[in-house]
Amino acid sequence: MKVKMNKLLCTVMFFLCVAFGYAQQITVKGTVKDGSGQPLMGASVLVKGTSQGTAADFDGKFELKVDKGAVLVISSVGYKTHQVPAKAGVMNIVLQEDTQQLDDVVVIGYGVAKKKDVTGSVNLVTDKDFNKGQNLSADQLLQGKVAGVQISSASGAPGGGQNIRVRGTGSLTLNSNPLVVVDGVPMNDGAIGGSRSILNSINPEDIESMTVLKDASSTAIYGSRAANGVIMITTKKGKMGQETKVTLNTSIALNEVSKYVDLLSADDFRTLVNNTGTDTQKALLGTANTDWQKEIYQLAPTTNTTLGISGNLKSVPYRLSVGHNYADGILKTDKFQRGTAKLSLTPAFFNKSLRAEFNISGSYIKNRFADPGAIGAAIEYDPTQPVFNGSQYGGYHTWLTSGTKNNNAPTNPMALLKLKEDTSTVKRVISNLKLDYTLPFFKDITATINAGVDYTKSDGSKITDPRMPNTSADFNGVDESYSNEAINSLFDAYANYMKEIGKSSLSLMLGHSYQKFEFTNDSNKNEYFKNGKATINTPVLDKSRNVLISFFGRANYSFDDRYMLTATLRADASSKLNPDDRWGYFPSVALAWNAKNETFLKESESVNELKLRLGYGEVGNVNGLGDYLFLTRYIGSLNDGAYYQFGNQFISTARPEGLNRHLKWEVGNTVNIGLDYGFFKNRLSGSIDVYRKLTKDLIAESSVAPFTNYSSRIASNIGDMENKGIEFLVNIVPVRNDNVNWTLTYNIAYNKNEITKLTNIQNVGGINGGTGNTVQRHQEGYAPYTFYLYQQVYGADGKPIEGAYVDRNGDGKVDESDRYMGKSPYADVTMGLTTNLNYKNWDLNIATRASLGNYVYDNVSSANASLDRVYSDNILRNTPRTYYDTMLAARTTQTMLSDMYLHDASFFKIDNVTLGYTFPKEDKLSVRLYGTMQNVLTLTKYKGLDPEVLSVDTNNRATSGIDNNVYPRPRTYLLGVNVNF
């Protein structure tokens, strides 16, 4: 009986407990919306402290049974996490946009990812971290900001192009600049004729962020176009729920020459001639005191204004901006004027299951190009001669022989600037429409279509005045016109599948891309002569087209936010290559271990991030390769001025070019090991990366047997190259309180670049002086563009002994075989340091850079600093003051190839200093006034114009390390105002 009673009691207690438990549970129903009232599909609703939860449906609705007294945690990407006590009945929950969380999202190929989930080497730079001041081209925003990314300008001309290298030079003859992707549209490889840069058509004020993909595991999704890294540009857009916002940014700046080439003054030049010249030579001296450099340069104004409006128009987020820039170059007659307009619409339909993004930006640029030859002429021209002397050439002083210009004399620099009119207009439109559709019957899949176009049209003319100093008595001017068109069309289609199963997260992406590049070059040249008014007409119409077809896929797997795997594969087919070698397959795989989420660190307050990354990937390269080199092609003679004469008519001809039927992809594979870290509430954070990149089948020119091809040299796959290095980035917040916020960002990178295989040695680095002289070489075992020079012998006084060079091979004579491979123009180590200090309403930004181990060849001195150059050709030429360092009597081929002109050009630069003040906010009006100084200071041992030089060699290739009449970078003083309301 007792046993039965106990059983009955237990049964009763069990049912009472169950009933009590059910009595403590409640059913919670609700809707999750954003600030504009739009439902947030997929928002996570979890019971705090448990894994129990659900996700909001298509309409943002959810339903969940929870214990009474439970707390709900509601979250969604891009919104602040919200906690609220659970209550029975209907709950309406509104999530606010989290701008900090948006900063933690980076744009990657065909999607976005949280920074904590990224497995590759990726750097994000947002608009708050961009370089301040006058930036006419988008790439200037990044200079010195990312470890391993070097950005240098070819000249100081307004809107001029930049040379961008991600982890060193990746090719010998192909384009080594990274792929630039603007809102999902990959841009053309380079600028078309009449345009200064591919990036100066984008208004920097429209850019919200720039993401740099550096290693192959992150770039392989872009395949063949990503061999040199990728820069993803995301422009500003309106946001859902945002009130109407108006921004006005305007500034005015003055630009001046920061440094002149150190030449002899007129009085010093007279002293030199009177001490060393003959009576005939002394008689050539003039009475003027002309500083030709100060004649050709000027104080140049720049204005920049951008007006932007963003908000919601009937629940459609939008942003509209218009901008205008005007800039005079510091070289007289150089002008750059740009108008831009941009519209972005980001609506959502069907409760956000269909999301659209429409971008269109247009630019209209007017250029007047100053003749850069005036820079070299100003260095040479006799400072004792006046600008004007009443000559028949517009009154400009001209050295004459038999009544016409001396054929070997420099042309008056001011005549080159004033009697030539080289102008162009460039119109560009970049537009795309992207549609994301979440399938209603399978909400884990989102299908995307992205169609875009990048259209550029340029028209230009080059008119030379009949009064231009000329060696022909019959010269009556030149009229040359041209028109260029480039159309880059894109169609992408891909689908993303995302699924979370327990602690596992899986995402798959599969897609197809079609990109077509079309170019049309139409040029016409007319020359007019006095006698008989003979005319040369050489109309040339050159069209080309190439196509890139791709298939790609990516898989991401994450377990418990601790272990991550990313794998990609892209197959590219380029019409530039022959059908047998057209397809390239580029895989990548990356692993990451998020140690922060391990049990032993998860609760640590001092460790905020600790992630180890390991990646490997392959990418191809045909960027900058000519079209259809495997086919017989014909080139018009306009390119080299070779015409066939019929009476007074000169007819352009066409001839076949060399071909290679076996040309194939350059392929680079990279191994990258990285560590991301953050400590002490991320007041100390950053990353460390170690990498090794091997590039195989480098394309370079090789010699072929006579009569076996249409040319003696053709492009061939003949080499391999290695880049390896280490990068370190650290962000430090020394002070952060209510009044003061001080941050320091420092990056340092070491890179070693070496050609490991090269079948044919390549002489490169053409210089001024003599014919066909080169001072650099591509050779196995050395860095590209390594200097190849004679070793100078010096006397006891430290001055070079003229004509004396080291017999390095000991054969008793000094000849070509005694030249040696020496220093590299590329820095071993590069650094960038930026400090931002905010004190109450004041803000101070200072951006600096350093380069260690880069060498420069001083071509200005080698071509001009010898006594025979002062007196040659029955004229007088000025000389750089470096003449007194060498005291050379004559310029010869060997003296020009001497390493006495090679100098260590390591430098430290203060690029920008900006001081601003934000006035106390009144109602919704915010005003910030700021001043900026750019190109503030350069510390270097190099005596030339600038230790950071980029020039174009005799083969029209961009090359570093040759100081050759470089357009100087200006020093800028800027005053600006930002208005927001």
Image (cartoon, rainbow, N blue to C red):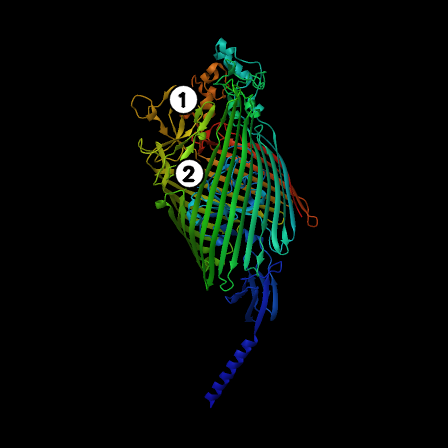
- Amino acid type at mark 1: Thr
Q: Residue 176 location in percent, x, y?
A: 44, 39
Q: Which mark is residue 144?
A: none
Q: Residue 376 location in percent, x, y?
A: 50, 24
Front position among marks 1 and 2: 2
Residue 256, placed above or below residue 686: above
- Residue at x-position 46% and y-position 18%: 869
Q: Residue 364 location in percent, x, y?
A: 58, 39
The residue under label 1 is 895
Residue 841, placed above or below residue 787: below
Q: Nearer the viewer, residue 472 or 899?
A: 472
- Residue at x-position 61% and y-position 47%: 320
**Is residue 943 visible to the viewer in this orientation of the structure?**
no
| Snapshot quadrant of residue 82 | bottom right
Identify the element where label 2 is drawn.
loop
- Amino acid type at mark 2: Gly
Q: Residue placed farthest to the right in the image?
A: 923
Question: Dot 2, how many residues are within 10 Å of its Cα: few (below 14), some (14-19), or many (20+)?
Answer: some
Name the N-terminal-most of marks 1 and 2.
2
- In the image, taking residue 254 as reference, residue 113 lies left or right, namely left
Identify the element where label 1 is drawn.
helix
- In the image, taking residue 618 as reference, residue 256 lies left or right, namely right
Q: Which mark is residue 626?
A: 2
Q: Residue placed farthest to the front in the image?
A: 647
Q: Residue placed farthest to the left in the image?
A: 811
Q: Nearer the viewer, residue 933 or 555?
A: 555
Q: Residue placed farthest to the bottom in the image?
A: 1
Q: Residue 854 location in percent, x, y?
A: 44, 33
Distance of label 1 from label 2 (alpha carbons): 37 Å
Please tell me how many numbered marks the rendered image carries. Answer: 2
**Is residue 84 visible to the viewer in this orientation of the structure?**
yes
